[in-house]
Image (tube, rainbow, N blue to C red):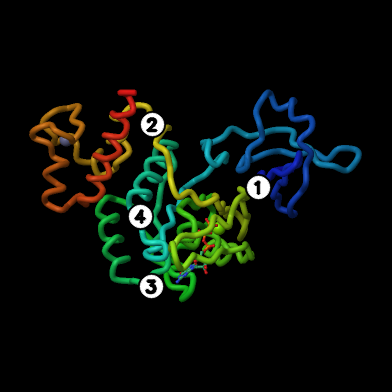
């Protein structure tokens, strides 16, 4: 029987199949040639004579992320609230780097638009300019949810973003489940990291959604060389052939097309500023 690993707890893997979820024992996985079963893996399972299931084969992976450990993700939905907690483009841009670094398409969801639709629209405009799909939604009013749903059908979507932005609330609506959601503290306007484990949920006939524990910070330690960052900015890649220097880092070089486009407001200033800050932080790392 074919299925997908959606959860692993205490020596068991749970496999979503066409006929429901089947519990399989982790024992015997040495047969799989040293590959550790990972959430998101497409697998074949066999039923043992004692009635327990066993993974007998893991199909080749399309990709695999390290944190959270999950395979075969089609897209990363970077979730941010417009307010409470306040939108943080610096963190959004870092998660975008993580997605592209793993060769996974990032899309952006700005939630809680019931709190401030005007600012949300401004960010949508900016990120759209940079080439991203941006969804504005509110799990309170239901606005934008159908459009988002349309972009998730038949795909595996991982939600990523800081605590308290509404990731679990979105999953509860999409997958019609009832995950625990947290209260955003009045004082700090931050979430409380309500969701702490990684689990994939199957919904509809062939769609999967994954709640990743909220990360409020993200180290760029997965990037080894500062010059990689420019290749993870789609709006830079698209326009860099017009830079005077072929290996332009869009930093201090003269005749830089990217800097020109920032001045013309065709590339958002904040995206560029974040780029410089990421670039500097990686160059600084080398000094120690
Ligand atoms: N105003 C408003 N509040 C929302 C909306 N969506 C979710 N919330 C609230 O925001 C709080 C946090 O939502 P969660 O879904 O728990 O956030 P999360 O991203 O899963 O947080 P962690 O699990 O901590 O990472 C809850 O009190 C929700 O009720 C929305 O569209 N508008
Ligand atoms: Mg949550
Ligand atoms: Zn340049």
Left or right: 234 with respect to 109? left
Give the camera-side residue of 281 and 261.
281
User: According to the image, label 4 marks what residue?
Assistant: 88
Ligand 1 closer than 8 Å to label 3 CB: yes
Question: Crowdedness of circle 3 by 10 Å Cα count: few (<14), some, many (20+)?
Answer: some
| Quadrant placement of the C terminus | top left
Q: Earlier in the sequence, mark 3 or mark 2?
A: 3
Expressed as whole percent of the image width and height from the top left, the position of residue 158 reads: 51, 50
User: In the image, which is nearer the foreground, mark 2 or mark 1?
Assistant: 2
Per the image, label 1 sits on a secondary structure element best described as strand
Q: Which mark is residue 209?
A: none
Residue with the most extreme left position? 255
- Rounded to the nearest whole Å, what is the CA distance between mark 3 and mark 1? 34 Å
Give the camera-side residue of 259 and 103.
259
Left or right: 194 with respect to 118? right
Residue 30 position by quadrant: top right
User: In the image, which is nearer the foreground, mark 4 or mark 1?
Assistant: 4
For residue 169, above or below residue 70:
below
Q: Residue at x 79, y 32 (%)?
A: 27
Q: Residue at x 44, y 42 (%)?
A: 104
- Rounded to the nearest whole Å, what is the CA distance between mark 4 and mark 1? 30 Å
Q: Earlier in the sequence, mark 4 or mark 3?
A: 4
């Amino acid at each position: 029987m074919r299925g997908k690993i959606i959860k692993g707890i205490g020596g068991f893997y749970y496999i979503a199949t066409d006929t429901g979820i089947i519990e399989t024992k982790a024992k015997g996985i040495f047969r799989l040639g040293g590959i550790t079963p990972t959430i998101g893996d497409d697998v074949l399972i066999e039923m043992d004579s004692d009635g327990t299931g066993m993974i007998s084969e893991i199909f080749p992976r399309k990709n695999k992320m390290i944190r959270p450990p999950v395979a075969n993700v089609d897209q990363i939905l970077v979730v941010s609230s417009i307010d409470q907690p306040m939108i943080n483009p610096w963190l959004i841009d870092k998660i975008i780097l993580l997605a592209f670094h793993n060769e996974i398409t990032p899309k952006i969801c700005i939630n809680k638009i019931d709190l401030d639709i005007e600012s949300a629209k401004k960010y949508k405009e900016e990120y759209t300019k940079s080439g991203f799909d941006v969804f504005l939604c509110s799990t309170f009013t239901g606005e934008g949810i159908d459009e988002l749903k349309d972009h998730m059908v038949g795909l595996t979507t991982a939600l990523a973003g800081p605590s308290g932005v509404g990731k679990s609330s979105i999953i509860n609506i999409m997958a019609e489940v009832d995950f625990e959601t947290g209260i955003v503290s009045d004082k700090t306007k931050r979430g409380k990291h309500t969701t702490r484990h990684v689990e994939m949920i199957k919904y509809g006939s062939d769609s999967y959604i994954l709640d990743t524990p909220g990360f409020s910070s993200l180290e760029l330690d997965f990037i080894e060389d500062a010059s990689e960052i420019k290749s993870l900015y789609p709006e830079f890649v698209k326009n860099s052939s017009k830079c005077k220097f072929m290996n332009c880092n869009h930093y201090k070089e003269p005749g830089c097309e990217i800097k020109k486009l920032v001045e013309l407001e065709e590339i958002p200033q904040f995206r560029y500023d974040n780029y410089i800050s990421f670039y500097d932080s990686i160059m600084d790392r080398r000094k120690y």
